[in-house]
Image (tube, rainbow, N blue to C red):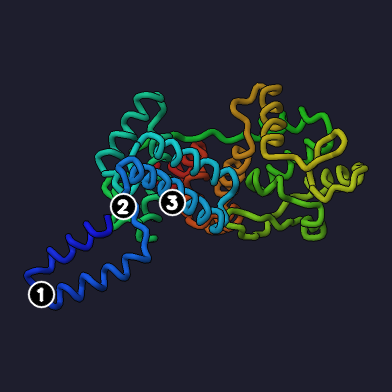
């Protein structure tokens, strides 16, 4: 096989070199090729290498997201979407075209009967992945650039009314759950921030606490006097040594997980017949109440830990009754 390669090279160089030079080239190739081992790659081997490279690129992308400080939930969501996308193509990701991605999104929507919001979320994840491939020089240009944002219906999402909040408070059967609800109501923190809170993070004098938000960014949030009293009572009745602020009621009193807090809140909503109660709803409620009462949106943005003010405006749904009052005051 080596001699075949040498003969092919010298044949290609016949018109460019003299006989003497060709002989010297041939001698050099023989000497140097003697130290090398040649492997003929079959189509199957090349195909497998492409698939292995796909896996390697996905793992590198996920690692980059972990370094950026994305939460475990976000990392898992990204990996599930990209793995499912990769499994749908028996080829190198670097060879996937714009039309193939469009077909994938269209087929996904048809097969799963999911909404436009879900499809656009998948598009955003894939866009992030292919942009990373472009930045890392795996591909020349992202094939998803020409696939624009999918239009989704704009709906006014519900917030919790004052009456809802009182019902939830009354339904709490223990001081832990009441403290948890009060802290969500007054701070609007994310559930991921709540589960990571330790008792040492609380500053009762200033009625504040430091939370670790998205991208591992710390920020200070504030709670009211009622929350302070409930928290102090809850902590004083604890008989465990766990540093976590919220722990399970039963031994060994482990730190509550995100799913654990979601279950507590959801059960309170079911028991009070309040529609779709979840931790994030308290966050939206706080933003809406703050803006309704005149807090500048820039301060609400800082309170919630949003990078973009557009995100804050998306959370803060203006109360329709306030719109009616303002219309009568300024226009009617």
Q: Which residue occupies the extreme left position in the image? A: 15
Element type at marker 1? helix
Task: Please give the label number shown on residue 103.
Answer: none
User: Of the residues tagged 2 and 3, which is closer to the observer?
Assistant: 3
Residue 50 seen in the figure:
yes
Secondary structure type for disc 2: loop
Number of dots carrying numbers: 3
Locate residue 120 relative to residue 73 in the image: left or right.
Answer: left
Residues packed near mark 3 inside 10 Å, few (<14), some (14 to 19) or many (20 plus): some
- Residue 215, position as x, y percentages in the image: 57, 57
Q: Where is the C terminus found, in terms of image quarters?
A: top left
Q: Earlier in the sequence, mark 3 or mark 1?
A: 1
Q: Quadrant of residue 135?
A: bottom left
Q: CA distance from mark 3 to mark 1?
A: 48 Å
Label of residue 19 in the image: 1
Residue that numbered label 3 is attached to = 57
Element under disc 3: helix
Say which of marks 1 and 2 sits in front: 1
Residue indicated by mark 2: 142
Q: Residue at x 67, y 39 (%)?
A: 258
């Amino acid at each position: 096989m080596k001699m075949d390669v040498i003969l092919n090279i010298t044949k290609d160089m016949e018109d460019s070199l003299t006989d003497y030079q060709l002989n010297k080239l041939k001698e050099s190739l023989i000497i140097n090729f003697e130290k090398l081992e040649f492997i003929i790659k079959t189509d199957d081997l090349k195909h497998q290498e492409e698939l292995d490279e796909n896996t390697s690129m996905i793992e590198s992308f996920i690692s980059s997201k972990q370094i950026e400080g994305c939460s475990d939930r976000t990392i898992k969501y990204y990996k599930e979407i990209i793995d499912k996308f990769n499994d749908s193509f028996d080829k190198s990701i670097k060879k996937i075209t714009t039309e193939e991605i469009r077909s994938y999104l269209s087929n996904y929507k048809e097969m799963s009967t999911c909404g436009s919001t879900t499809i656009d979320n998948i598009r955003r994840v894939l866009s992030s992945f292919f942009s990373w491939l472009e930045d890392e020089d795996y591909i020349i240009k992202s094939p998803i650039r020409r696939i624009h944002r999918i239009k989704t219906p704009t709906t006014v999402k519900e917030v919790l009314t004052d009456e809802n909040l009182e019902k939830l408070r009354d339904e709490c059967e223990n001081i832990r759950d009441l403290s948890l609800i009060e802290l969500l109501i007054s701070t609007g923190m994310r559930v991921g921030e709540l589960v990571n809170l330790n008792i040492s993070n609380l500053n009762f004098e200033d009625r504040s606490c430091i939370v670790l938000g998205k991208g591992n960014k710390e920020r200070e949030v504030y709670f009211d006097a009622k929350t302070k009293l409930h928290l102090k009572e809850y902590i004083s009745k604890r008989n465990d040594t766990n540093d976590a602020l919220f722990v399970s009621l039963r031994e060994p009193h482990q730190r509550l997980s995100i799913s654990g807090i979601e279950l507590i809140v959801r059960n309170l909503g079911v028991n009070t017949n309040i529609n779709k109660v979840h931790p994030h709803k308290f966050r939206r409620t706080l933003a809406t109440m703050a803006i309704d009462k005149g807090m500048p949106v820039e301060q609400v943005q800082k309170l919630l830990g949003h990078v973009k003010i557009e995100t804050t405006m998306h959370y803060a749904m203006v109360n329709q009754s306030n719109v009616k009052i303002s219309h009568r005051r300024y226009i009617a």
